Amino acid sequence: MKSSESPSVATWLLENFACGRENHSLIGDIVEEYRCGHSRAWFWKQSVGAIIVSFGTEIRANGFLAVRAVAIGWVTLYLGRVLLGSWPDMLSSPFDRRVPEAIDPLGHNGFIWWIFWIPVTALSGWIVGRFHRAHRAMVFIFSGSVLLWDLRMLPWICTLSIDVFSNSRYLPYLISNLAGLTLPPASILLAGLCNGPLPRNTLRLSK
Amino acid sequence: MRERFHLGNFELFVMLAVIRLGKEAYGVPISREIKERASRSVTFGSLYATLERLQEKGLISSELGEPTPERGGRAKKYFRVTAKGLREVRVTQRALLKLWQDLPQLEARRT
C-alpha cells in the first residue's frame, strides 16, 4: 500500500531550495496532488523541477550576482592553489615508497593532494555562499562552472571506462579521475549551502 | 502610449484557467484544468513561476487561504484575475482572432 506521507528527502529539498515567493503553497499543492494517488517518482520529478525552475528564475533575475558569484569562487580557488604551492608534494614525499599502488596509482600520492585541495574547494563554496546568503542558487551556478571546467576530463574518463573491462589495473585510475570530476563541485555545494541562513527565515511569503 | 504586455502561450493558458475556476483557482485545480482542456501536463514549478510573473505584471492577484491537513498544514494560495489581466486577455484574444482570419490553409482543414 502506498504511504500517504510525502517523500521526506524530496520535501526537505523543496523546503530548503525552492526559493520562490510562493514556496509554501507550491509544496502544499505538490503534497495534495501526491496524496490523490501519484507515485513517489512523480513527487521527485515535481520537486526537482520546482527547484530547477526556481534557481533558473533567481539566476535570470540576478545576472550580476551570478557573474559575481562565479568570479569570487574562481578567484578563491586560484588564491588557494597559489597558497598551497608545492606543500602537498613536499608533505607526501616521505610516503612515496610506503603507499600501495592500489591506493595511489598515479605514483605521486595524489590522495594527499586531494586532502589539501578539497578543503580549498569547500572554502571557495563557503565564501560564495556567505556572500550570497539570500540567493542560494549562486552556489549552484559556481559549482556548475567548476563541474563544467572539470568535464574536460570526460574523454579520458570514457577511455579509462572502456579500458577497465579489459584490464582491472585501470580501475584505481578511473576511480581517481571520477573523484577528481565530482568531489570539487560536491564539496563546493555542501559547504556553500551549509553556511547559508535557514530558508524558513528567508521565506518571503506574499500576502 | 499604453504599455502592452504580450502573453505567452502558457501564460494565456494559466490566465484562462484562473478565469474559468473563479474563486477556486489555486495550484492544483489550475494544473488539472490545463491538463484536461489543453492536454498539456504541467509541473508545479513552472506553473508557480508563471503565476509569480503574472502577479508581478499586475495581471492576477493572490490571497492565502487556511492551512489544511491534507496539504501537510500548508495554506492554499488563491489567485484571481485583475481588471488589467482581463483586459489583457481580451486584447490577446482579439489579436489571435485577427491572425486566425483568412487563412486558407486552416480553412481547408476544418472541412
Image (tube, coloured by chain):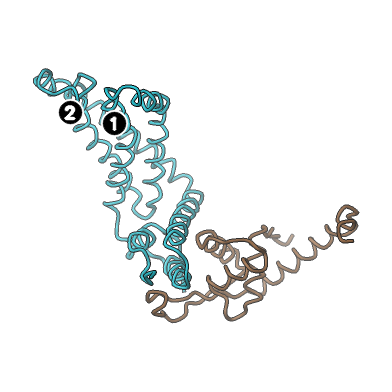
Of the image marks 1 and 2, the number of the one nearer the N terminus = 2
Mark 2 lies on residue: A112
Residue B61 position (above or below residue A116)? below
Give me the disc on residue A175: 1
Q: Position of residue B19 (x, y in %)?
A: 65, 75
- The amino acid beneath tag 2 is Ile
Q: Position of residue B72 (x, y in %)?
A: 38, 74
Left or right of A194: which side holds B110?
Answer: right
Q: Circle 1 marks a residue in which chain?
A: A
Identify the residue shown where x is 22% and y is 37%: A119
Q: Position of residue A163 (x, y in %)?
A: 36, 23
Residue A91 position (above or below residue A23)? above
Image colour for chain A is cyan
Q: Which chain is brown?
A: B
- Point out the image quarter for the N terminus of chain B: bottom right
Left or right of A30: which side holds A9?
Answer: left
Left or right of A172: which side holds A33?
Answer: right
Left or right of A181: which side holds B5?
Answer: right
Q: Secondary structure at mark 2?
A: helix
Q: Position of residue A129 (x, y in %)?
A: 32, 48
Residue B55 sits in which quadrant?
Answer: bottom right
Q: Circle 2 marks a residue in which chain?
A: A
